[in-house]
Image (tube, rainbow, N blue to C red):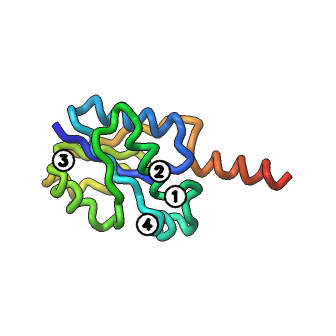
Amino acid sequence: MKVITFGTFDVFHIGHVNILERAKELGDHLIVGVSSDALNISKKGRPPIYSQDDRLKIVESLHCVDEVFLEESLELKGEYITQFNADILVMGDDWRGRFDQFSNLCKIQYFPRTEGISTSEIIDVVRSTAAN
């Protein structure tokens, strides 16, 4: 079974590890789409802390990840699922329902986020600490 997931994976943390390890448990091949810098700017209005090349290298170095690619557009999710012949799409439950339209292409699985941690919160803490 091929499993696919997507994310920015900026300021990599335990929540990222948790979702990737859980995704891998669903199949024997985990494919990860890492958001490009341009996509991140369009989604969040700011560039990521780490470059897309660094984020790709971080994600591909994980034992649970078999394949990585650069996600260029949110609108191409269906094409990525088809291109990689994915059986299951895994996303965090903060995206619940947003990808159900792809259920004709593969099974959709939403996992709960790891409580108490998020990239945005980490960045805010670092910025407030640096400002003081």
Residues at marks 2 and 1 touching, judged by CB atoms closer than 8 Å? yes
**Residue receiving disc 4:** 39
Spot occupied by residue 92 in the image (x, y as percentages of width and height): 40, 44
Point out the tag, 1 or 3, that comes first from the N-terminus.
Answer: 1
Alpha carbons under labels 2 and 1: distance apart:
6 Å
Spot occupied by residue 29 in the image (x, y as percentages of width and height): 22, 37
**Residue receiving disc 2:** 55
Helix, strand or loop at label 4? It is helix
**Residue receiving disc 1:** 51
Q: Residues within 10 Å of mark 2 (few under 14, many from 20)?
A: many
Where does the N terminus fall, quadrant-wise? top left
**Residue receiving disc 3:** 86
Point out the tag, 2 or 4, that comes first from the N-terminus.
Answer: 4
Point out the tag, 3 or 4, that comes first from the N-terminus.
Answer: 4
Q: Residue at x 79, y 52 (%)?
A: 130
Q: Quadrant of residue 66?
A: top left
Alpha carbons under labels 2 and 4: distance apart:
13 Å
- Callout 4 amino acid: Leu
Point out the tag, 2 or 3, that comes first from the N-terminus.
Answer: 2
